[in-house]
Amino acid sequence: MRGRMQGVWLAALISLLCHSIANAGKEAAAAVCITSERDALLAFKAGLCADSAGELPSWQGHDCCSWGSVSCNKRTGHVIGLDIGQYALSFTGEINSSLAALTHLRYLNLSGNDFGGVAIPDFIGSFSKLRHLDLSHAGFAGLVPPQLGNLSMLSHLALNSSTIRMDNFHWVSRLRAPQAISSLPLLQVLRLNDAFLPATSLNSVSYVNFTALTVLDLSNNELNSTLPRWIWSLHSLSYLDLSSCQLSGSVPDNIGNLSSLSFLQLLDNHLEGEIPQHMSRLCSLNIIDMSRNNLSGNITAEKNLFSCMKELQVLKVGFNNLTGNLSGWLEHLTGLTTLDLSKNSFTGQIPEDIGKLSQLIYLDLSYNAFGGRLSEVHLGNLSRLDFLSLASNKLKIVIEPNWMPTFQLTGLGLHGCHVGPHIPAWLRSQTKIKMIDLGSTKITGTLPDWLWNFSSSITTLDISSNSITGHLPTSLVHMKMLSTFNMRSNVLEGGIPGLPASVKVLDLSKNFLSGSLPQSLGAKYAYYIKLSDNQLNGTIPAYLCEMDSMELVDLSNNLFSGVLPDCWKNSSRLHTIDFSNNNLHGEIPSTMGFITSLAILSLRENSLSGTLPSSLQSCNGLIILDLGSNSLSGSLPSWLGDSLGSLITLSLRSNQFSGEIPESLPQLHALQNLDLASNKLSGPVPQFLGNLTSMCVDHGYAVMIPSAKFATVYTDGRTYLAIHVYTDKLESYSSTYDYPLNFIDLSRNQFTGEIPREIGAISFLLALNLSGNHILGSIPDEIGNLSHLEALDLSSNDLSGSIPPSITDLINLSVLNLSYNDLSGVIPCSSQFSTFTDEPYLGNADLCGNCGASLSRICSQHTTTRKHQNMIDRGTYLCTLLGFAYGLSVVSAILIFSRTARNAYFQFTDKTLDEFRAIVQIKLNRIKAGRRQSMEIYRLGSQNSITCYELEFGYTTEGN
């Protein structure tokens, strides 16, 4: 019986096994791909190029289900997955419409390829079973086709690309935007970053039903909205990236509802207010990046804000307005690998407990107000530290000379801290270091030899603004990785040695370097060279204009001589040339006109001659053209106004230009500074000066120059204009050029005629100098319309008549010079004018005043008018003439009849003539001295920038 039962069980087992084998055979047979779908894939492959990774050659044979990047349903054999993005093969070519035959497709990934800017194929919208669609960074361009709105089964959608755009959200199920997104209830991953989403109010969505969403990435879109309220109902959300979306408003308390959130990135927006306390509920967070906003509040007051975030690894809140100190909360975040609190207003000392953050790799506390001392106790346990920046704080670094750190840094920033007097000895152990910034750290003396031995790693070396002495070593050429070398503002002497070819940024300005530049600088790929304010001599080498990458070259304030090299045709990237204050002569080379990218050209204070080369009219992006204090001649060309419409500063002072100001000048709609002083210009003062529209508005705190690709132009609100010039690669290395704002100087020329009444239209003019010309007529009443005027110099002209009462409307006037004209009458009285002495009025014999001016002539209470005074003068002259005639007849009679009387008369006449000659000569000497007399120095600017004006209203520029 027992044996019979075993036989039954054995028979049943064999039967089941046979059945399973049979079914397996059927399924295996069924798993062979569908012929039509195989043909569709082969047609798709035929349209592709660049199969460099050898993946698609496996697409051979009858069974496409065995091909790479293809997956099939094991039961039906239908193709359900196509992934040519997983290996980043960078295919090119076209998307063959044969793919439309893959009607059972559930997974499609075409990302990371380059399909040449073609539109997303409409037929993708026919894959109704599709659940995963990734077209990110695949080279598609244009609008997203509305057919994608048919893909209601999607759980993963990635369209992030800088070339795809969406005018609206209608493509999602063709519903009203942006409510349409909620029609995808199965959606788990939505990536629309870099997708040119239209600016829209995301808060117009009141309810969404894609509650399964775990990943939402809308970063790098200009949404111009507040944070959308519906996001806070997505309780399954673990990844949220809304960075660089132009979002505004505050972060609401409802963010505490996202209890599953592990990744939060809101950087680079306009968010404000405090970090909400309800964020303390987000205990799963391991990455927080809220940097580059306007967040405020005291972190110390919210000590429990991060207390439950035991897995927090990255905390970045730099570039905000946060306050507080680091005590009582930071030491608990022991899992941190990245901490960035830079560019805030944190105070206090850095606690020694920061050493408990033993997992730290990246630590940036720069640009705060931390004080006190920092020693090896703070850093001793940070064995994983790779980057450390404490720059621009009030810290004193006190580390024992024999201390050896356990970490190996790649970057160190201590700019502005008190490190000196010596280079830290422990730096010698940092053999992997790439970036060292010890600028403004009070280091003195010579640099140690071992510093130049970082030849295999160092890329950035900044020891600027110290008191370092000695010479630059010849071994510098062996630092093969060096890219940025900044030794600005030290006491270095000697010549400049050869540099490694790797150097891109070179700043050796404000030292005592001498000699000529080497025959080969070595840094042939440099794009920023600043050697200003040294004692360098010789000629400017031609290789500077043969460096194709050059963007800024500044050799100002040296002793260079000779002619300018004429080889600038290939300098297509150059935007700043400053060779001012040298001993250069010859003409401005015509090839400079080929530098169409040029924004700043300063050649002032040399001995250049010739005319303005007409080729410069091709430099239509010029912001500053400063050729002052040379020997240039000829007339001012009309193309100055016709072609250089972006000019902010035009300075041609102290040359030998002649003729009239061209009528095209008012086309300089951005002009803020017009300085043509000390030339031989003639003709009437142009009426069209009133059409300089940029001086007729208050620019506030920004002057927008759209064509200025390489310059940031800003003001202090009223009185000065600074142009911050930088390279497009490294903004932190820059030059600043300060010029007076809303300033016109036409002094010491040969202008004639009257002051045009139209000049009163330049309502925001701050300084006007027309002195030293031959201007006639009266001061126009419209001068009172210049309500912002702070300096007015009309001295040494031929002005007549009275000072208009409207001049008292110039309530901001602090410098006035009307001396040496033919003005008459009463000086207008106001609280402002009562502060002036008699100097502004000297040389005007018929002026009088009772308003604080200490003129020798005080007006009486019944001062006669000019007309009545002239009548009195004529009567006096007539009586004097009659008296003289009568006296002459008497004297003649006496002389005829008396020899003694005749001798006495001639002696009296000779003595009187001698006294008269002496009086006239003294008067002339006083007039000449008065014309040379300097005005009170007039200061324009803020605490950060001061420009001094003398009689000729000269300005200064400073490169920082």
Image (cartoon, helix red, strand yellow):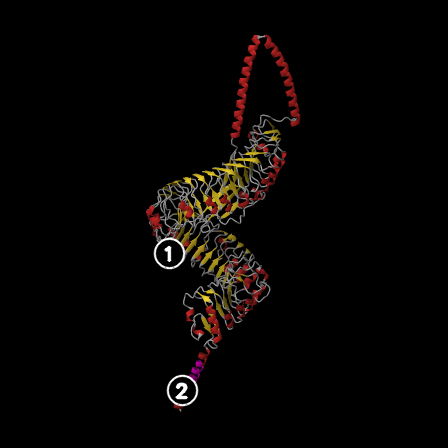
Front one among 590 and 701: 590
Where on the picture, by quarter, is residue 690?
Answer: top right
Residue contact between numbered discs 2 and 1, judged by CB atoms under 8 Å: no
Q: Identify the element where label 1 is drawn.
A: loop
- The numbered mark at residue 10 is 2
- Which region of the structure is painted magenta? 5-25
- Report if residue 8 lies within the magenta region: yes
Q: Picture coordinates of residue 339 (x, y %)?
A: 44, 55
Q: Main secondary structure of the magenta part?
A: helix
The amino acid sitting under disc 1 is Ser
Q: Which mark, residue 102?
A: none
| 871 shown above or below 600 | above
Say whether residue 311 is left or right of residue 661: left
Q: Residue at x 43, y 66 (%)?
A: 51
How far is mark 2 from mark 1, CA to CA? Answer: 67 Å
- Of 435 and 523, nearer the camera is 523
Q: Which residue is denoted by mark 1 in the rendering?
A: 383
- Badge 2: few (under 14), some or many (20 or more) residues near its Cα, within 10 Å? few
**Residue situated furthest bottom in the rendering:** 1
Residue 8 vs residue 874: left or right? left
* Amino acid at dot 2: Leu
Q: Residue 831: x and y, percent?
A: 60, 34
Q: Is residue 518 magenta?
A: no
The residue nearer to you, when weighing 539 against 780, is 539
Q: In which quarter of the image is residue 765?
A: top right
Quick one: label 2 or label 1, which is nearer the N terminus? 2
Q: Position of residue 740 (x, y in %)?
A: 52, 40
Residue 186 seen: no
Can residue 911 be seen? yes
